Image (cartoon, rainbow, N blue to C red):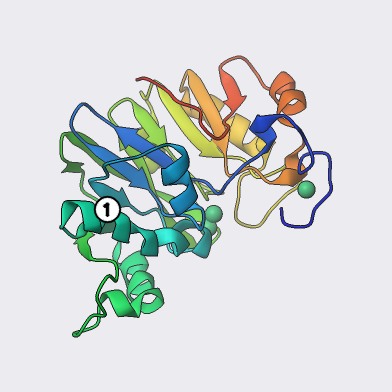
């Protein structure tokens, strides 16, 4: 956190050094990113992502969409609009926040994006199957996604029974866990641990972690077997 001198923010353990929450999902032929955080540009530079086929959005909060402008680099190299997958609520905010990308007469070099609407049905991006999962972020519906045997849920504090079924059977799940203290729209660490147990997914990683949670090395020790804190640069092969 900017200007914070807490033990997490001043830690020299790289795993305590977090940018905003996002993942990259890659198959043999397709690469997609979930959300474009305010750190999107640096995340793509850091991970040396040369090619990006699509962006899939969870919800329209600023920490999940703010970096969208920087798709222009991919537009430049591919000479194609970026494929965006989002529900209608998120699309409305994207159009409002990036009006210049939707203008009739566009300034040269603005991001070029093509909107695809996510409803409740599964869809594919290239050869990657995507099953949307509806979760609740206080009152806001947020989309989680299941990609084959891997599920990614962020910014939730409640999941309806029917949607839990869509996650069950995954080999690995990423779930948000903000901190230990209660929060109105995010799972606490205890709530996230309980949700993983309820879902019965054998391997779980926690994300969207606040500096208030504590140091990676300390918190990881407290977690049950099969659960750990995610960290920037964590890579999984499923
Ligand atoms: Zn801090
Ligand atoms: Zn949010
Ligand atoms: Zn968020």
Q: Would residue 180 be visible to someone looking at this image?
A: no
Q: Residue at x 27, y 38 (%)?
A: 31
Residue depicted at x 22% and y 52% = 77
Q: Which of 212 and 16 is in front in this view?
A: 16
Give the quadrant of residue 230: top right
Query: Toward the viewer: 150 or 67?
Result: 67
Determine whether, in the image, residue 3 is placed left or right of residue 183: right
SS at circle 1: helix
Examine the image and state in which quarter residue 180 appears. Answer: top right
The residue to which callout 1 is attached is 74
- Which quarter of the rendering shows the C terminus? top left
Position in image of residue 206 (x %, y %): 57, 34
Residue 65, image x and y in percent? 43, 61
Q: Residue drawn at (39%, 37%), measured in percent from left and top?
A: 48
Is residue 184 left or right of 174 when viewed as pictured? Answer: right
Q: Does the residue labelled 1 lie within 8 Å of ligand 3?
A: no
């Amino acid at each position: 956190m900017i200007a914070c001198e807490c033990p997490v923010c001043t830690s020299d353990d790289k795993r305590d050094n977090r940018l905003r929450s996002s993942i990259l999902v890659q198959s043999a032929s397709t690469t997609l990113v979930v959300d474009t955080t305010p750190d999107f540009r640096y995340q793509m530079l850091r991970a040396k992502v040369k090619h990006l086929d699509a962006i899939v959005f969870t919800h329209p909060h600023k920490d999940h969409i703010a970096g969208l402008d920087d798709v222009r680099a991919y537009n430049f190299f591919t000479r194609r609009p970026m494929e965006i997958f989002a529900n209608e609520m998120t699309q409305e905010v994207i159009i409002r926040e990036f009006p210049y990308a939707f203008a009739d007469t566009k300034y040269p070099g603005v991001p070029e994006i093509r909107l695809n609407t996510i409803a409740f049905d599964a869809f594919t991006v290239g050869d990657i199957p995507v099953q949307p999962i509806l979760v609740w972020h206080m009152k806001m519906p947020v989309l989680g996604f299941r990609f084959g045997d891997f599920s990614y849920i962020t910014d939730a504090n409640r999941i309806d029974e029917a949607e839990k079924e869509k996650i069950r059977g995954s080999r690995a799940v990423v779930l948000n866990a903000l901190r230990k203290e209660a929060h109105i729209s995010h799972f606490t660490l205890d709530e996230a641990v309980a949700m993983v147990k309820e879902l019965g997914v054998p391997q779980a990683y926690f994300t969207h972690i606040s500096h208030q949670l504590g140091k990676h090395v300390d918190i990881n020790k407290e977690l049950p077997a099969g659960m750990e804190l995610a960290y920037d640069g964590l890579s999984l092969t499923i």
